[in-house]
Image (cartoon, helix red, strand yellow):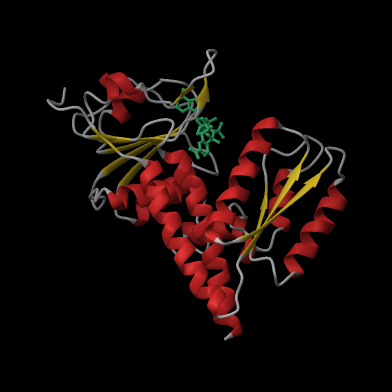
Amino acid sequence: MSSTPARIISGTALAQSVREQVAEDVKALQAKGIHPGLTVVLIGEDPASQVYVRNKALACEKAGINSDVIRLPASTTQDELLALIEKLNQDDGVDGILVQLPLPSHLDEHLVIESISPAKDVDGFHISNAGLLMTGQPLFRPCTPYGVMKMLESEQVALRGAEAVIVGASNIVGKPMAMMLLAAGATVTLCNSKTRDLAAHTRRADVLVVAVGRPNMIKGDMIKPGAVVIDVGINRLDDGKLAGDVEFASASQVASAITPVPGGVGPMTIAMLLVNTLEAAERRANKES
Ligand code: NAP
């Protein structure tokens, strides 16, 4: 066990400073006549998606980014959605397009994401953005792992040569996280549901990132003393409280630094969406000048 409890890495505080910087940069762009704009497309009535979209729009508004939310009924057809995305692709006032996931089951998620212009894909989910990230020439980085990298940077965590272990290998978190840590010089292990002896891997980690969606699955005895632990998981418990994928009470006795849930990676995800939208608008400004 570590003799002192872990330092808490506050995503709330870091996200606030990122958002303030974005707001300043947006003002500078506006002075040049460029007004950054994000369009969010929400299909159906999923309550969690409604909350996410509202929070994204509010964050844009506070940063001075124009945000437009297009709400469509769950009955929207694939052709209707693709036609709308094509219209947004062509609209010069739209820097970023985000289609809120999950989609109703009759819509093909891959096809929809691939129909977004890669130059406006501020979620960083388009196959060409995934490929660019993989080959070391990122255009848009997926917001959650991008936010994790910002947290590690602000904590001055040494990544070159470090053992980084990621638990969870989804396209939106685990895989792009692996690419970003690899690019930073870490030796990366990516675990999934078939991993044998998960604890043998997690115990080797100098930096442990967990993104599975199972409350409290990583306990203190699965963590190397002094490790930096990033908990991406957000799980709603039966009593209504939120819990991460890491058991905070035991993990914080072993780790040197740890993110809380809530108030950790979550706020950073929205902050990095603003960063990506700003970057898109800056590229437009450079093209127009
Ligand atoms: P996902 O698409 O469901 O992927 C989960 C991953 O975990 C899969 O790769 C799966 O392995 C792996 N897994 C499942 N059980 C495992 C086990 N016992 N041991 C090791 N790996 C296991 O999830 P996601 O979208 O990445 O989300 C993960 C969590 O992060 C969720 O709680 C989600 O709410 C949260 N999240 C938070 C933010 C944020 O802003 N903080 C953003 C996105 C997601 P297989 O590949 O073998 O199936």
Q: Residue at x 53, y 74 (%)?
A: 29
Q: Looking at the image, can residue 137 be seen?
A: no
Q: Is residue 91 above or below residue 41?
A: below
User: On the picture, is 222 further left or further right than 240?
Assistant: left
Q: Nearer the viewer, residue 190 or 24?
A: 24
Residue drawn where x is 48% and y is 44% of the image: 175
**Does residue 109 lie above or below 196 as drawn?**
below
Q: Position of residue 246 (x, y in %)?
A: 38, 25
What residue is drawn where x is 68% and y is 37%? 50
Give the residue furthest to the left: 3
In the picture, the quarter occupied by the C terminus is: bottom right
In the picture, measured across the screen, residue 264 lies left or right of residue 61, that is: left
**Vertical arrangement, residue 133 with respect to residue 143, above or below:** below
Give the percent coordinates (x, y) of residue 203.
26, 28
Q: Quadrant of residue 93?
A: bottom right
Position in image of residue 159 (x %, y %): 26, 50
The answer to whether residue 175 of the structure is visible from this angle is yes
Which of these two is toward me, 95 or 77? 95
User: Where, by quadrant of the figure, is residue 12 drawn?
Assistant: top left
Instruction: Please identify the quadrant where the N terminus is shown.
Output: top left
Q: Residue furthest bottom?
A: 289
- Count of numbered circles in the view: 0
What residue appears at the point 43 percent right and 49 percent down from the top-left corner? 147
Residue 110 in the figure: left or right of residue 198: right
